[in-house]
Image (tube, coloured by chain):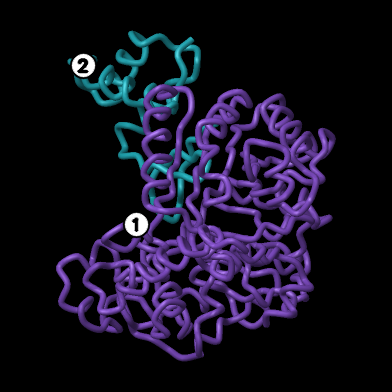
């Protein structure tokens, strides 16, 4: 129902859904790209901490994923 | 084309492709222009492909295939596929009439993202009366098939005095049909709805009751169904931010290729809407007189020009200002600051008097015969 795609004209990732669009900042887009149905939350956190060479992202990522879940951008297995 | 040096023109994001004015339904609140029968010519497939390519290049990403009934165009699957390849998120805005399972599958394979089906009422009798066509059962079947084939299902119900009392049943129907989105669109009084306003405009009490029911339901289905509620602007104190501002976001292409800043804009005098057969989308969007006409704030009159809310609502809707006050530069009369605001109360009173009259005149249905009679 929702589609994540890179928009060249806006230089942004966006989520598209019926009659709507959400523009994502870079970190939100990176989180959602990893929500591919194969990774667990723990793996997503580890991967992102590696990508951004930092630690302690778990709370921020969890909070964002809760928003994403509530908006239907992702589904819980 | 008239040039313009205005800066800060944002690119189009939404493209509404009105493929045709042909429609098997006759809804008396249709948003198509009253004189649609005069505009018989339709763009060729290649014209539409050029429009899609040019608008996409500028940044348009949401695409609505609309009409009329877009299913009457044989090249719809071809255009859907073309749009998908360009990266559009495409929406089919349909009455459902003539939509078969085979076609639903074919459109899915072509890359259609979602289907919005309109239903006129919660009962067969009223639906078929309003649509001017026997269509209720078929629409329900289509809604099931849309779900079955994995599309997000958007149910659209236009709300007015003839069906507003059915609000609880309309909501139940949406839930039963498994709608992912429900659009409750209070009638906007343009085009055919303007002609039929005395018969369609509900009272404030009816609106408030219906809205209360819809709000309570919204909470009940939160997380399962999203509800879009198009507000009845006649009962608001401030106008809607029409089209998110003229020439900022929305681009409509009419069946004959006229490019419009909103789908009613061809009714405004002297705009001379440019045609995609003559100009590129980029020229039309950036340079045409039409698209620059109401950009920014310089065109405004008082009370808009000194209003501290002008950046919020852009003075409201230009088409409504013209329809209700005869002046397309005036504040939208919906605004309580407008010197013409009294026309709104007069419209409400007139509709109420009509509802109470013994011999209420019949609805004028949207068809070619009536279009020719009225234009």
**Of B257 and B226, the residue lying toward us:** B226
Compared across the picture, whether A19 is left or right of B53 comes to left
Give the chain coloured purple: B
Within 10 angstroms of label 1, few (less than 14), some, or many (20 or more) residues?
some
Can residue B155 be seen here? The reply is yes
Q: Residues under labels 2 and 1: Cα distance?
A: 44 Å
A55 w.r.t. B289: above or below: above
Q: Quadrant of residue B178?
A: top right
Q: Residue under label 1, please give it.
A: B235
Q: Residue at x 20, y 78 (%)?
A: B303
Within 10 angstroms of label 2, few (less than 14), some, or many (20 or more) residues?
few
B63 w.r.t. A46: above or below: below
Q: Secondary structure at mark 2?
A: helix
x and y, in percent, of residue B207 in the image: 41, 47
**Of B219 and B43, the residue lying toward us:** B219
Q: Residue under label 2, please give it.
A: A59
B370 w.r.t. B302: above or below: above
Using the rendered image, report if marks 2 and 1 lie on a common chain. no
Q: Residue at x 47, y 23 (%)?
A: B224
């Amino acid at each position: 129902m929702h589609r994540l795609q890179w928009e060249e004209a806006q230089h942004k990732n966006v989520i598209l859904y019926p009659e709507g669009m959400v523009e994502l900042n870079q970190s939100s887009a990176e989180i959602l790209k990893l929500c591919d149905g194969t990774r667990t939350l723990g793996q997503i956190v580890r991967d992102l901490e590696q990508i951004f060479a930092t630690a302690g992202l778990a709370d921020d990522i969890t909070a964002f994923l809760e928003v994403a879940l509530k908006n239907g951008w992702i589904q819980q297995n | 084309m008239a040039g313009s040096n205005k800066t800060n023109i944002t690119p189009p994001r939404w493209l509404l492709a009105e493929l045709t004015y042909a429609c098997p339904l006759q809804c008396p609140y249709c948003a198509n222009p009253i004189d649609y029968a005069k505009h018989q010519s339709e763009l060729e497939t290649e014209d539409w492909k050029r429009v899609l390519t040019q608008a996409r290049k500028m940044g348009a990403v949401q695409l609505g295939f609309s009409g009329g009934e877009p299913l009457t165009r044989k090249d719809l699957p071809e255009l859907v596929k073309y749009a998908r390849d360009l990266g559009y998120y495409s929406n089919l805005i349909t009455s459902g009439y003539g939509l078969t399972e085979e076609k639903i599958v074919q459109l899915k394979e072509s890359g259609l993202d979602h289907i919005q089906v309109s239903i006129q009422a919660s009962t067969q009798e009223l639906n078929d009366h309003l649509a001017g066509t026997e269509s209720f059962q078929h629409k329900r079947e289509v809604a099931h098939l849309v779900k079955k084939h994995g599309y997000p299902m958007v149910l659209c119900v236009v709300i007015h005095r003839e069906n507003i009392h059915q609000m609880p049943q309309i909501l139940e129907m949406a839930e039963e049909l498994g709608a992912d989105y429900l659009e409750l669109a209070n009638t906007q009084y343009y085009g055919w709805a303007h002609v039929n306003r005395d018969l369609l405009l509900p009272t404030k009490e009816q609106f408030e009751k219906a809205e209360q029911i819809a709000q309570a339901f919204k909470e009940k289905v939160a997380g399962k169904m999203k509800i879009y509620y198009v507000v009845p602007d006649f009962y608001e104190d401030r106008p809607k931010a029409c089209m998110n501002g003229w020439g900022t976001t929305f681009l409509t292409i009419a069946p004959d290729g006229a490019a419009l800043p909103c789908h009613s804009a061809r009714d405004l005098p002297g705009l001379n809407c440019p045609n995609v057969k003559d100009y590129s989308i980029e020229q039309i969007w950036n340079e045409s007189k039409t698209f620059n006409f109401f950009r920014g704030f310089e065109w405004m009159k008082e009370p808009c020009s000194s209003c501290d809310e002008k950046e919020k609502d852009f003075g409201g809707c230009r088409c409504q200002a013209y329809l209700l006050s005869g002046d397309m530069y005036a504040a939208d009369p919906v605004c309580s600051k407008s010197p013409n605001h009294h026309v709104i109360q007069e419209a409400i009173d007139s509709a109420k008097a009509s509802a109470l009259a013994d011999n209420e005149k019949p609805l004028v249905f949207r068809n070619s015969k009536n279009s020719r009679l009225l234009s």
